[in-house]
Structures are given as C-alpha cells and as structure tokens.
Image (cartoon, rainbow, N blue to C red):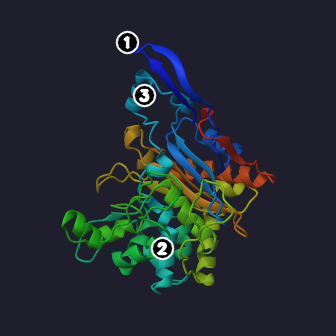
C-alpha cells in the first residue's frame, strides 16, 4: 500500500505534497479454482438461481464454486456508487448472496444414501431387507399418511431399489427404527450441521436437528413424525451446497475427507474419517451407480449420455406442502403452483466410481425435479472435467486487481 502526505489550507485545498511512497504490490493469491471449469459450470446453470460446488475428494480442493445470479465484481474495485449498490442490494434475485457458502436448503433425498449407511452400520437392515411400499407410511395409532413421491407406491422394496427409485416409504421406516439420535450422530460424521472450515468467512452451518436442539431452540419435545421426515432430508434439516459436496466427497473417498480449500497449498487438511465397512460402501455405491444407469433410476439420462461411470443421488426439496388429499403424482411441476413455490432441484454425485477425482453438488432453486434439472447439469460438469486431461492452472492474481465479470419429476 502506498502513502502520501499533503499540506492543505484552511479551505481544504491541497497546496503541496510533503512526503510520498510508491505502492508495493500485494502478494499473489493462488486459488484451487479451475477458471475454465468455473466458466463452464456457470454456463450450465445459466440464468437460473442456484449453486454448483465441485470438489476434488482426494484433497478437498475447490475446483468450481458457483452462485447464481452473480454480479460484476469490478463495480467494487474503486468504490461502488450508491446507485449501483442499492440496485444490487434490493434485487429480488439476491445477487450479493453467496448461495454456495450461505444458502441453506433442505437436502431432500440427496442424504438417503447416508441414512442407508446408518441403517447398515447399526445392523437394522442388510442388502436383502425389504418392505412393501403402498405409496404412504403410517405410524402406529395414527391416521396421518406420510406420502411417498410416487403415489401408487413402489411395491416390494429393498435398499437397492429404495435408492435407485428414491422410495420415501423405505426411508420413513428406516428413520423410525434408527431414531433421531442415531441419525444425528451418524450424519454429523459427514459434516452435516456444521461448518466445513473452508478458508472463507461467513460460512453457514446448516442444521442437523436433534431432540436436544429442539428442546433448546423451541422448548418442545421431539415427535416421531419429525424423525420420519428427517430421514428423507425434509423438516428442520438444512444444508449448504458446500456441505453437500463435502459430504459427497467423503463418501466418494471411502470415508476419508479433507477440509475444503480455495487457497492453493502444498498439503491437504484431513477431517476425522468415517469408518465405512467396505461391504456397506460397495452395496450403496452399486445402487448410486444404478441411479444413473438403471432404466428405473431417477437420473437414468446420465447413463445414456456420459462415458464415465457416475454414482449419484437426486433430490427434490419441498417448498410448498400439498394437502393430504392431493393425489397429483407430478405436483412439483404443476402449472397452477407459482414458480417461487415450486420445489428445489438437487443432485449430488461423484466420478469415476473406480477412482473418484470429482465430487459435485448442484441446487437449482425452484427447478422442480432433481433428476430432470439438476442431474444433467452435474453430469455435464463432471463430464467436462474428466474429459480434460490437462486441467488449466489454478487461478493466480494479485490482490487488489480487478476481477473479470462472470459469464453469464421425481426426487
């Protein structure tokens, strides 16, 4: 930073320069972001509001960090005008809000594979355990129907089918048997409900609910029905796109994770590993592959259009609650529901499954179907990264320089 001392008269007019020193350039800041991948991911999201976070599960490096809508950061370099700041700050699309870091969304079905692992870990299910899904679930002595996204039901369903077709009823039952305490304990190992520790300020921690949290926050007891909807990523549960990508990276790496980092450095910082038996990981990963490959998978289009083996899970985060009597199977895309009340579309995944080098989380606000909207975006981003054998160097720029403006169903 340079310095200049000047002499002024009583009216504040400058008379002469008394002393001055030339500015010294700041240190270069080298980022892990790949500029070409960042641009490509932004283009895939387009004009839609949402976020894409891409991590390298082998070391926690952030390869792309997208939040849309965005803004021209050059406006702030020499001091933003009052008019421009007011325009950005009052924009209903909230371009100043970093959705990747601070956006908190219900994860929906994107956490079902973690709930499934919890059931395997506690010995409540195995790969052959099955139940009949009639399209709804009833708690004992209750007439309230906890609906499946597929109103006609999935029929006889085991863990594989439950993940591939995203059966809610299977996970309602598993969540009930696990209980909220074990759900909270197991999922917290993947970083849900806590800050990842990324080298940025302002990260939100999301919310992984528990009976203790509800008692402290609301002075209320925990109800069984709340356990059921937590098991499908709804209710009080909230996650950030960064958290979802981080949890997916840990799963992709067999339980070994690293603190996400944007500043390029020589060593990765490990997090406490999750002990996942290989047989459990194998069973769940096989199902996540079938999500994108099976003709019944909720993201089956990815298997048809991408050459790399992708493991993933779709999700639909409910924004508008339908009545108990609404029998419309495709309610999340009904024309009579205003766009701002339509469900958020989500997808998490990693590739290639034999040696994962990329993990991604995509959230499209009010996109409707995770399989139809978010999954193709994630697939294109992973395909682009894996198809470029010589990724471009990490971003390298001097602090204080101008930043180029950004270019612009079922679960």
- Vertical side of 140 occupied by 146: above or below: above
Which labelled disc corresponds to residue 189? Answer: 2
401, 324: nearer the viewer: 401
Q: Nearer the viewer, residue 203 or 186?
A: 203
Local SS, label 2 = loop
Q: Which residue is mark 1?
A: 11
Q: Is 309 on the left-hand or right-hand side of 137? A: right
Alpha carbons under labels 2 and 1: distance apart: 64 Å
Pick whichever of labels 2 and 1 is earlier in the sequence. Answer: 1
Which residue is depicted at the point 21% across and 63% down? 218
Tell me where residue 201 appears, x and y as whole percent. 47, 51
> Residue placed at 60% from the left, 60% from the top?
349
Q: Are marks 3 and 1 in contact (CB under 8 Å)?
A: no
Select label 2 or label 1 by which is in front. Answer: 1
Residue at the disc numbered 3: 85
The vertical placement of 27 against 131, above or below, is above
Label 2 – label 3 distance at C-alpha: 40 Å
Look at the numbered disc 1 and give the secondary structure of its residue. loop
* Image quadrant in which you'd find residue 292: bottom right
């Amino acid at each position: 930073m340079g310095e200049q001392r000047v002499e002024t008269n009583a009216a504040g007019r400058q008379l002469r320069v008394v002393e001055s020193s030339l500015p010294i350039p700041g240190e270069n800041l080298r980022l892990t972001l790949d500029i070409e991948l960042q641009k490509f991911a932004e283009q895939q999201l387009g004009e839609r509001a949402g976020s894409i976070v891409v991590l390298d599960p082998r070391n926690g490096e952030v390869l792309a960090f997208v939040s849309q809508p965005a803004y021209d950061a050059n406006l702030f370099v020499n001091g933003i005008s009052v008019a421009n700041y007011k325009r950005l700050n009052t924009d209903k699309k909230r371009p100043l809000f970093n959705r990747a870091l601070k956006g908190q969304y219900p994860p929906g079905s994107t956490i079902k594979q973690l709930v499934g692992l919890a059931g395997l870990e506690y010995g409540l299910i195995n790969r052959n355990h099955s139940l009949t899904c009639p399209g709804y679930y009833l708690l004992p002595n209750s007439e309230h129907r906890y609906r499946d996204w597929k109103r006609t039901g999935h029929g006889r369903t085991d863990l594989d089918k439950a993940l591939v077709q995203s059966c809610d009823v299977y996970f309602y039952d598993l969540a009930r048997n696990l209980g909220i305490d074990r759900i909270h304990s197991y999922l917290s190992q993947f970083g849900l409900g806590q800050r990842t520790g990324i080298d940025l300020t302002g990260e939100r921690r999301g919310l992984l609910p528990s009976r203790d949290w509800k008692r402290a926050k609301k002075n209320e007891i925990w109800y069984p029905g709340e356990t059921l909807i937590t098991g499908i990523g709804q209710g009080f549960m909230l996650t950030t796109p960064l958290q979802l990508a981080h949890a997916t990276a840990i799963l992709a790496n067999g339980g070994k994770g690293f603190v996400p980092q944007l500043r390029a450095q020589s060593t990765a910082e490990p997090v406490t590993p999750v002990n996942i038996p290989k047989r459990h990981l194998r069973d769940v990963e096989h199902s996540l592959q079938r999500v994108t490959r099976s003709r019944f998978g909720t993201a089956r289009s990815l298997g048809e259009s991408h050459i790399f083996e992708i493991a993933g899970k779709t999700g639909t985060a409910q924004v508008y609650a339908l009545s108990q009597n609404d029998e419309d199977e495709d309610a999340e895309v009904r024309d009579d529901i205003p766009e701002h009340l339509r469900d958020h579309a989500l997808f998490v995944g990693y590739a290639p499954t034999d040696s994962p080098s990329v993990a991604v989380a995509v959230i499209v606000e009010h996109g409707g179907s995770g399989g139809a909207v978010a999954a193709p975006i994630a697939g294109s981003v992973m395909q682009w990264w894996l198809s470029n054998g010589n990724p471009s160097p990490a971003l390298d720029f001097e602090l204080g320089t101008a930043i180029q403006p950004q270019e612009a169903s079922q679960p």
